[in-house]
Image (spheres, rainbow, N blue to C red):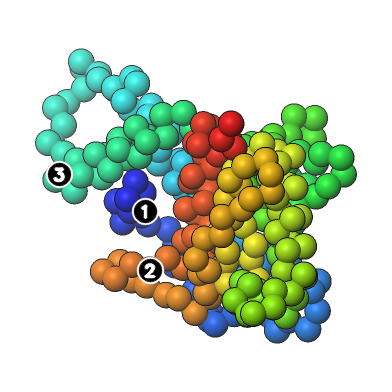
């Protein structure tokens, strides 16, 4: 979070409370999980990404074409907090020098390849309304109930073969779209995934439980913040692509 921590502290959105330790909707079947995600996280992540890129776009325009009117009355000097805010935006713009505004959505919002559809997608903003120019899925995500898949399935002396099936599925999505990042989200935790090579080797990030919370003074990587951060990584046009 070194690159984006200052941005998180500088830009605020309306508070959106997520109950813990799991989604608000009681899950009785696998089909309940997409509904729970829609109720608890979809709108929050979508709004936070949109707000982030609105601020970055405004700052980029100011840097490209400073608005100076010779007939305008002299303006009062900028306040220290305004200067600091712009410095924060400038640092993030420098990090995202090769970047694209992105949004989170369901799988079909991004390009569907060979009729394989991930549950969730991160795609180029503004393209979902035009079905002829859909972008690649920069961050394929799969939703699984914790009783069917969990990282703890790997920690026993016997690894359940079912553990590998969702990973193989997400790996296939990442391979199709040429991206190196993906994730699995359960009703208990978020697990980031990185594709290491073309041989099916994956690196799993530390699970982020729904119970994890934080404050501005004591920040913690929550499920919502983890999804936002993965989105910001994949906004980089060079970083999101799989390494050759």
Is 213 situated left or right of 182 in this image? Answer: left
The residue closer to the viewer here, 161 or 239, is 161
Where 17 falls versus 139 (above or below)? Answer: below
**Residue indicated by mark 2:** 220
Label disc, if present, on residue 75 of the rendered structure: none
- How far from the left and from the top, in percent, is residue 193? 59, 55
Rendered residue at 58%/72% (across/down): 189
Element type at marker 1? loop
**Residue indicated by mark 3:** 79
**Residue indicated by mark 1:** 1
Where 5 falls versus 241 (above or below)? Answer: below
The quadrant of the picture occupied by the C terminus is top right
The residue closer to the viewer here, 209 or 105, is 209
- How far from the left and from the top, in percent, is residue 95? 37, 36
- How far from the left and from the top, in percent, is residue 235? 52, 39
> Of discs 3 and 1, which sits in the foreground?
1
Is 102 situated left or right of 225 in this image? Answer: right
Where 5 falls versus 110 (above or below)? Answer: below
- Which is nearer the N-term, disc 3 or disc 1? 1
């Amino acid at each position: 979070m070194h690159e984006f921590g200052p941005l998180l502290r500088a830009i605020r959105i309306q508070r959106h409370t997520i109950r813990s330790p799991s989604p608000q909707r009681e899950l009785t079947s696998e089909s309940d999980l997409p509904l729970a995600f829609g109720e608890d996280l979809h709108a929050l992540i979508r709004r936070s990404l949109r707000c982030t890129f609105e601020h970055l776009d405004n700052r980029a325009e100011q840097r490209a074409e400073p608005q100076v009117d010779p007939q305008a009355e002299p303006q009062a000097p900028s306040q220290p907090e305004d200067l600091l805010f712009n410095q924060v935006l400038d640092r993030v713009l420098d990090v995202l020098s090769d970047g694209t505004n992105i949004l989170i959505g369901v799988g079909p919002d991004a390009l569907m390849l060979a009729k394989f559809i991930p549950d969730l997608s991160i795609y180029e903003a503004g393209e979902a309304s035009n079905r002829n120019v859909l972008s690649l899925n920069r961050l394929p995500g799969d939703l699984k109930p914790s009783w069917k898949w969990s990282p703890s399935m790997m920690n026993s002396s016997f690894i359940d073969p079912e553990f590998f099936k969702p990973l193989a599925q997400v790996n296939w999505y990442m391979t199709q779209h040429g991206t190196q990042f993906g994730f699995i989200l359960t009703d208990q935790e978020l697990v980031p995934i990185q594709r290491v090579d073309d041989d099916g080797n994956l690196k799993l990030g530390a699970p982020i439980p729904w119970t994890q919370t934080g404050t501005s003074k004591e920040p913690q990587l929550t499920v919502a913040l983890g999804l936002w951060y993965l989105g910001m990584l994949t906004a980089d046009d060079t970083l999101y692509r799989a390494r050759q």
